[in-house]
Image (spheres, helix red, strand yellow):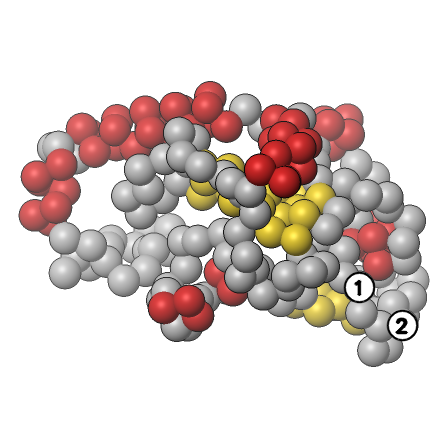
């Protein structure tokens, strides 16, 4: 992307990772780091070569990053959007914050919500027990502290932080209602199951090929 000086800043990212057999899991659809984490590489005249940043970031950070890198002025409505410039984050200009991820697809029985805040990774399932990982002591997410009485206060603090940015019950109810509506529009569950699936989302204007 062109910078205001005419030199280039470039970024590379993705939308999810893949479990690839870790913990006996394949595919994506989980909140473990192998699935929810994505690679992100940036280069540019004001980004130090070889520098790394361990701060959690989100895809919503792309929007303010593009605005800053191109010198575009935000619209009035942009001020209320979440996210922070990756350039500011890499320079250490952004303080501690809550980074959110959520999942509602592929037959999920309930909504799942994940936040990273400080050393904690907290996973909240509506109607099911939570999960908590200490990213400093347990970077491979092997020890779930979510139901450990010693960490009840940490779980409560993380849930409070989650609810400061999203209402899990309301969002889950809205997602399930929307899914039920789409299923009904296509003839109900049996009709949808009989139709089959397709390997990838079709591009605009392309008809999906079911199998």
**Nearer to me, 170 or 71:** 170
Task: Tell me the element at label 2.
Answer: loop
Which residue is denoted by mark 1 in the rendering? 53
* 176 horizontally vs 169: left or right: left
Reply above or below: 177 against 65.
Answer: above
Look at the picture and state if 73 lies above or below 80.
below
Give the image location of residue 133, x and y in percent.
Answer: 60, 51
Look at the image and tell me whether residue 14 can be seen: no
Which residue is painted at 64% across and 61% down in the image?
Answer: 138
The disc placed on residue 200 is none
Q: Which residue is mark 2?
A: 48
With 69 as the anchor, is 197 left or right in this view?
A: left
**Is residue 123 or residue 188 the one in the foreground?**
123
Q: Where does residue 79 sit, x and y in percent of width and height?
A: 77, 30
Which circle's residue, 2 or 1, is located before the other in the chain?
Answer: 2
Label 1 environment density (alpha carbons within 10 Å; few <14, some 14–19, many ≥20): few
Give the camera-side residue of 32 and 15: 32
Q: Quadrant of the N terminus?
A: bottom right
- Label pair 2/1, CB-CB below 8 angstroms: no
For the question of whether residue 164 can be seen, the reply is yes
- Give how far apart the Cα atoms at labels 2 and 1 are: 11 Å
**Residue at 40% over, 29% down:** 127
Q: Quadrant of residue 64?
A: top right
Picture quadrant where residue 54 is located: bottom right
Tell me the SS state at disc 1: loop
Where does residue 147 sit, x and y in percent of width and height?
51, 40
Quarter of the image for the C terminus: give it.
bottom left
């Amino acid at each position: 992307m062109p910078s205001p000086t005419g030199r280039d800043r470039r970024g590379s990212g993705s939308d999810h990772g893949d479990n690839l057999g870790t913990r006996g899991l394949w595919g994506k659809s989980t909140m473990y780091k192998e699935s929810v984490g994505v690679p992100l590489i940036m280069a540019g005249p004001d980004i130090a070569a070889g520098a790394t940043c361990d701060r959690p970031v989100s895809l919503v950070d792309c929007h303010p990053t593009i605005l800053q890198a191109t010198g575009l002025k935000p619209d009035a409505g942009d001020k209320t959007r979440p996210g922070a410039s990756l350039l500011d984050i890499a320079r250490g200009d952004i303080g501690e914050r809550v980074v959110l991820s959520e999942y509602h697809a592929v037959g999920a029985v309930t909504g799942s919500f994940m936040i990273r805040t400080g050393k904690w990774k907290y996973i909240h399932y509506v109607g099911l027990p939570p999960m908590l990982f200490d990213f400093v002591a347990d970077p491979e997410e092997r020890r779930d502290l979510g139901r450990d009485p010693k960490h009840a206060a940490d779980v409560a603090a993380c849930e409070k932080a989650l609810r400061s940015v999203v209402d899990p019950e309301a969002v889950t109810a809205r997602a399930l209602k929307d899914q039920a509506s789409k299923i009904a529009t296509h003839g109900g569950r049996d009709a949808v199951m009989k139709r089959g699936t397709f390997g990838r989302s079709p591009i605009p204007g392309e008809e999906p090929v079911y199998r």
